[in-house]
Amino acid sequence: MEMWNNRKIAIGSTNPAKIQAVELAFAALSIAVEIVPVDVPSGVSPQPQTDTETLQGARNRAQAALQQGQADVGIGLEGGIQRTEWGMFLCNWACAITTSGQEGLGGGLRLPLPYDIAIELDKGRELGDVIDAWAGRHGVRKQEGTIGILTQGAVRRADMFRDALLCALAPLMHR
Ligand SMILES: O=c1[nH]c(=O)c2ncn([C@@H]3O[C@H](COP(=O)(O)OP(=O)(O)OP(=O)(O)O)[C@@H](O)[C@H]3O)c2[nH]1
Ligand SMILES: [Mg+2]
């Protein structure tokens, strides 16, 4: 992985949980990088409603971050929901794009959302706002995240996005 050392990595978000996920991912790979948060549009709704929309949001952010951050690699991390016949799930996607146009995608954990959260999302509200009210907290989205609240802190949002990002980076690191 020597070739990856000291590269400039632009993350398409200023959310601390997402920035920490990028730090954790490259630390896990023992790669030293410069990480630059870039505030970019996701190009999808503030609350993505499907796996596909969430994945597209990650791709849009990665591309925008690469360009706006003038980086070697652009990263997009996007959370959303997916309705299924078994209920509503939190879904998460990571995308990494290089200046040579190589693109990697990685999927994050899926978590069933309680019915009283799901019905609020069906009203068009954002999960970040709903989980704050549900947990009696402020800014959960920038801390352990919904996944952290619902797993009693065992899986934090940064950890979940770290693993999704490691999956997205994998195809870019094959020899
Ligand atoms: O508390 C949360 N824990 C989570 O695990 C989670 N996953 C998704 N969301 C919410 O879904 C919408 C799109 O997500 P999102 O990727 O845009 O994230 P975000 O808005 O927090 O960051 P960002 O847009 O500044 O990068 C936003 O309302 C997020 O709050 C989460 N909120
Ligand atoms: Mg957002």
Image (cartoon, rainbow, N blue to C red):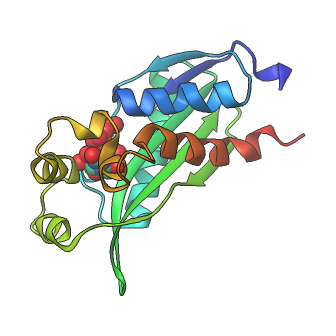
What percent of the width, then of the height, locates residue 95?
55, 45
- Which residue lies at the image location 90% right of the left edge and 40% below the top edge? 175
Nearer-the-camera pick, 137 or 85: 137
The picture places residue 129, in percent across and down from the top left corner, at: 14, 47
Q: Position of residue 72 (x, y in %)?
A: 64, 22
Residue 43 in view of the camera: no
Please indicate, yes or no, whether residue 86 appears anywhere in the rendered image.
yes
Residue 134, relative to residue 102: is it above or below?
below
Q: Nearer the viewer, residue 171 or 23?
A: 23
- Identity of the residue furthest to the bottom in this view: 85
Viewer-closest of 139 and 125: 139
Q: At 39% across and 32% down in the image, what residue appears?
A: 17
Looking at the picture, does residue 151 appear above or below residue 140? below
Q: In this view, does 47 lie above or below 165?
A: below
Q: Is residue 126 left or right of residue 152?
A: left
Quadrant, the N terminus:
top right
Using residue 51 as the reference point, say whether residue 30 is left or right of it. Answer: right
What residue is rendered at 52% in x and 47% in y? 94
Query: Which residue sits at x=36%, y=84%?
Result: 86
Q: Is residue 46 left or right of residue 123?
A: right
Q: Looking at the picture, how far across and down is residue 4, in whole percent?
A: 76, 22
Give residue 71's quadrant in the image.
top right
